[in-house]
Amino acid sequence: MQGIFHKTALAAIAGVIVAGTASAQVVVNSNITTSTTWTANNQYELQGQVYVEPGATLTIEAGTVIASDPTPPIGSLAVAKGGQIHVLGNRRNPVIMTSTEDVATWTAGDPRTGVWREAANEWGNLTIMGAGYISENAVGTNVPTCDPGNVADMEGLVFGPSLDRYGGGNDNDDSGTVRYLNIRYGGLEVSLNNELNGLSLGGIGRGTDIHHLEIMNNVDDGIEIWGGTVNLKHFSIWNIGDDSFDVDQGWRGQAQFGLIVQGYSLDASQGSGVGDNMFETDGAEQSSWQPVTTATIYNCTAIGQPIDGDHGMAFRDNARVQYRQCIFEDVGEHLVRFDNLDGDGGLGYGFGGTLSWPATWTTSYTQTSTVNPCANPAARYQSQFSGNLIEVVDSVFKAGPNTNLTEATARGVLPGNMTNGNDTSATTTLRKLVRAAPVLKGGKVMLQVIELDPTPKIGGLAHSANGTRPAQGSFLEQVDYRGAFAPGTRKNWLCDWSSSYRFGFLAGCDNNNVDLNGALVGQ
Amino acid sequence: MIASPLLSAAVLAAMTAACSESSAQGAVAADRTAPAQGAPAEAPAATGRPADDAAPAGSVVDAPLAEYRLELLDLAYRSASAFPLDPHHKNRARAQERVVVACFDLDQPHRALEYAEGIENWRRGAAYADFAYYCAQRGELERVEELLDEAMEVALADESAQLQGWRVDCVRAKVARVHTLLGDDERARHFADGIDPSQARELEQLQAELTGPDALEAHMEVVDQAVEIGQFELTRNALARCTAFYDHLYEDEQVRTALAEKIQASWGRLPSMLRLEFLYSMIRSAADHDDPETAAALANLATEVYEGANWDAEEGIRQRARLAHFRHVAGDTEGALEAAAAALAEYEERREEIVNMWRAGVLRPLAEAYVDMGRPGEAAGVYRLALEEGILNPNSRPRCDDLVDTCVSMARNEFEPDEDLWDFLREIHANLSDPW
């Protein structure tokens, strides 16, 4: 049975109940070489780094729980390039990837219950690798322009190139579907001294569908994307120990409807337990290489740590990212941060004839880089469709006591520039935001968010947008509000299925109903 | 309005929406089929399946095609359709679409439409739009509107297309392309409005090509300006058009030489793969104009470009196969055979560097090159090797994709399998089952 066996003794002891059905405990401790379906009537435990090998498909039914033990061999799941994963959760029965420590807090094994804990590092993560174009200069055969031969070795994986490499020449690549997935308490290094991100996406193409995803309490980044063109919609990232949303190596996708709630997962240093940047965007490992990160982020709500959080939007190595219809509240340091360098050898904006930092803000999105140009830039860069290469427009900012607006002001982000449609608010734009009393974690003062209705206040500055609507028919939906959540009486998309809902952090979900298929009713 | 004969194959190839699945897995096949796609309107080929009342477009008929090629297409389609819908609905539709596109390229529009009916997602709408384009290219306009309506209806009805708008945009781009071809710029703009920018740009490019000046002198200035500005896309498009002029005005040696020099002097900032594309286009032109000396010189230059670039095992071997093919096109069949042998040797040497599910994709271009060189024995050997490598993976998904692509490759390249190879193809098809 290829490394999968029923842990009958444990099942007998634990008596785990999932959705009213007695579940068997299944240990998965070797690679998935033949296509497999994990079913909701079992609970799966990963032991060691488990790969879905090229050609194999892992299908995970709605309601399935994958709970791994925090003792070695540390469980973790990676889908190699050429493999596929189909996580088929729904609103009533999401898929949960977590630790056995988390499951121990569930009432009678019911995944709809559970208690948030100060914890992370209890298992590995979910890594998916694909064949989209990337830019990376550590592999000797790579070249500085868009090339199907450019590949990279996935951070934190140590098997070797046959399973750890991602990147290629197919931006439409399809690694499967991930929907209604909760990832909790992860990030524990499996083989190297490398913390893992909650969800790592390397070279993932736009043929892959990822939506309704929440990462809760990871030790490293929440989501990190390297290259590729994957699009994300309806994602939530809470209490992450490093950057919440991190991109590099030429990501050229779009993201819409994202919630970031900064906090801590562990009492450890910032970057390994206490949240760092909300968005950290790197262009390429070497800033003059292509493809370079060129992306559009619409309708995100980012709630920072007002005392000791880090930056809102950090830019490095020629990254080109547009933020539109977003909400930033309580940023701990710079709202816009010109990091310039990533610390990994990249030489920043302006290197090798690329655009300078100020010029990138004033250059039209149509001007793809002429340094190391891609053979077909129109095909490689599809995510931006108007405006300038970097811009922050039609958004609203509520500063915290330590929010630094210097760079944001220099770049014309703040109101006063009549063309960008941005607003500032003295108070929160959200219907409810309750923080716990200050605590010291990793030497930083943290005010954890413990209750949140992330929908906009009626009539508030987030309630309507000024008109920089996404293109009709694109991945992006046309909405006329700022932030990730629709205003008014409609219930928000996090209710029912997410960890934040099940841990009791979400307010305003009381009247939410779904039918047996997980679809909303009565809307 | 009908496409200008000067419209380059490269431009038209680029017009194929990026979201569509190319059926030409091998570069040689792509080269062979691109001109057919880009050909100006012509009278439909004689005979083929007679149009009947059910046929959507009366004068568009399936061209005659050898029975074995039809069987290969049919096996490819049946294999693609063997994918279980859950969870492989995307994989299934993509594989089916590759066969449909091959049918269009082989002038089997009705077969394409018949196959398209089995596609259960937005790609069926894309196929309807492709059929409309095929009809429009041939002046058969009776049902174009209806087909375009159906194309959009299918796309908009697909939940997955709604989830990722680029899928709808793919169909919108194809619809806009038909209107552009027919000179209805207003409706083309309507459908192109707000779509993913690459597709919009491609449409604008086509519009410019259709209405732009044909004067060479003016175009040379355009090239100089593009190089001076340094804007990549302008340069690429300008040079692509140069290759079209190169072909069209080939008999004028002075002009031809000036164009060749202009292309090479202007490609300094373009990557190797694109330089090779221009050279291949020019080799084809030289060969078509019975100029083996020039073709050989260009083939040598292509070899230099290839050798000056870094390639990984997969791409390097594929490119070697392609070079072999164009050596043959240039008249150097002996050199081509040596290059093909070198590609095969490199494959054997570096095989372990290539994951098993991608080996067949490396080998198919080599088999196609051998077919074109008139070496069916070697082609059969490489095709068999591709099939053997394709079934090393224990899962039916990659096996199925390889079977589809190999069948399509054989059909496109007029390679008739012998009985043993047929048996092997059918056996692989029969064994498509769990685990997928």
Image (tube, coloured by chain):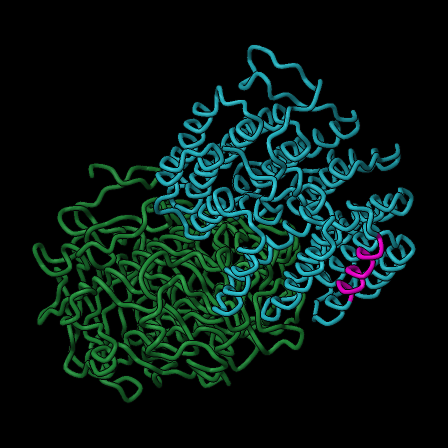
Taken as a whole, is the magenta stretch helix, strand or loop?
Answer: helix
Instruction: Kindly identify the residue that appears in the image at 36 percent across and 56 percent down.
Output: A385
Q: Quadrant of residue A32?
A: bottom right
Does the stretch in magenta take in B390?
no
Say which chain is cyan: B
**Which quarter shows the C terminus of chain B?**
top right
In this rendering, is residue B188 above or below A486?
A: above
In this rendering, is residue A382 above or below A193?
A: above
Instruction: Kindly identify the residue that appears in the image at 60 percent across and 44 percent down.
Output: B6
User: What residue range appears in magenta?
Assistant: B292-303
B182 horizontally vs B301: left or right: left
In the rendered image, the residue lying farthest to the top is B53
Say which chain is green: A
Tell me where residue B124 appears, x and y as whole percent: 51, 32
Tell me where residue B176 appears, x and y as whole percent: 43, 38
Pick the residue in front: B91 or B241: B241
